[in-house]
Image (tube, rainbow, N blue to C red):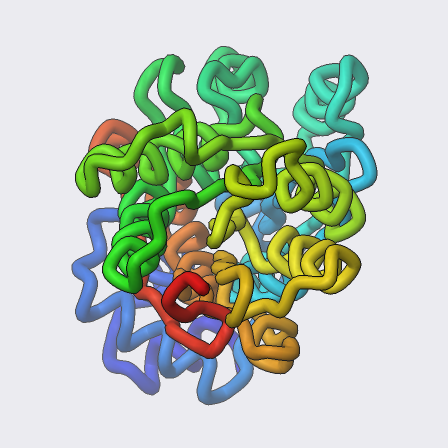
Amino acid sequence: MSIRKLAQSLGLSVSTVSRALNGYSDVNAATRERVEQAARAIGYRPHPVAHRLATGRTGAVALVSPVLGSSRFDNSFAQMMHGVTSRLEASGYYLLSMALPGDDAELPGLQRLLDAGVIDGLILTRTRPRDARVALLQAHGIPFVTHGRTLHNEPHAWVDTDNERAMRLAVGRLVSLGHRRIAMINGPGELTFALLRRRGFEQGLSAAGLDPVQCPVVHSELTAAAAQAVAIDLLNPADRLQRPTAIVCANDVLALGAAMACRQSGLRVGKDVSLTGYGNSESAEFADPPLTTVDHQVFESGGHLADLLLRRIAGEDTAVLHELEPVRLIERTSISPPP
């Protein structure tokens, strides 16, 4: 079906339908949703060449992620991409996914993408507190949104989860069970999410009056093997009385590595050592024992990323385009009162 016939079926002008499908802010939300639902129902897709000639846009946006060390993309990343594409498709956009090396080659790689002129907007992941990539995108003037905040860049559009509250919830529940020596295995310290989750962990300690010296924070690459190695050191101190009775992990993958370290150390997860993760992944639910974790609605976050990017492409003010996603603790049998 052509856009003209789609417009006729809705009793709207071709211009209104076109602007609704392309996310223009001068089309009210109710009309835009009506048009998008109708387009989805009939499987409407704009012709890419006609779309570019009519709008000056390519119809493509990119999702760019750095690969840090030996870290890998997990199922949460796939869920987020699904949320992004589900929202973009209704507006006639398709998604390009790019992985760039998280080192000195990252900025030149991003610059080449921008110079190619093949995208209308960009989603950036794994932000840093002061992110040179964000500064580059702002200088270039391309619409973009980040998955995760920055803390020291000029204002920009972002979607993030409430990382601080997530860690406060985990610490608070462990404290309520009687734990007083709680360690944290965090992600790489140069990433914003790790900084915010450490901040939330320390807020939880402070609220409970716990001594931070007895509650160490260690950083790890985002792999189970890396977490296993640092957890071995945590669980086998020179003075066994200083061993943590609980470990809060910055994601489920790290928690699975810590669980392996517990078994290697002759300790039972959920009995001798309590473990929490973050992400509510499928592997957490089917771990042995099932892992207590934080749920953060990954699919919905992807949809919000796409929505904010479409609004940026339509010209909305970047300073007001922020979305802080809620979190909730999913309690399973990996935690219990300390022995």
Name the residue located 44 percent from the left edge and 68 percent from the top edge. 335
Name the residue located 43 percent from the left edge and 50 percent from the top edge. 305
Q: Position of residue 130 (x, y in %)?
A: 47, 15
8 or 34, nearer to the observer: 34
Left or right, 15 with reference to 40: left
Q: Where is residue 156 in the image (x, y as percent from the top left)?
A: 35, 27
Quadrant of the image containing the C terminus? bottom left
Q: Is residue 254 above or below residue 334?
A: above
Name the residue located 51 percent from the left edge and 58 percent from the top edge. 277
Which image quadrant for residue 259?
bottom right
Q: In this view, does 129 lie above or below 326?
A: above
Badge count: 0
Quadrant of the image containing the N terminus? bottom right
69 or 292, nearer to the observer: 292
Name the residue located 45 percent from the left edge and 88 percent from the top edge. 41
Q: Is residue 181 above or below residue 286?
A: above
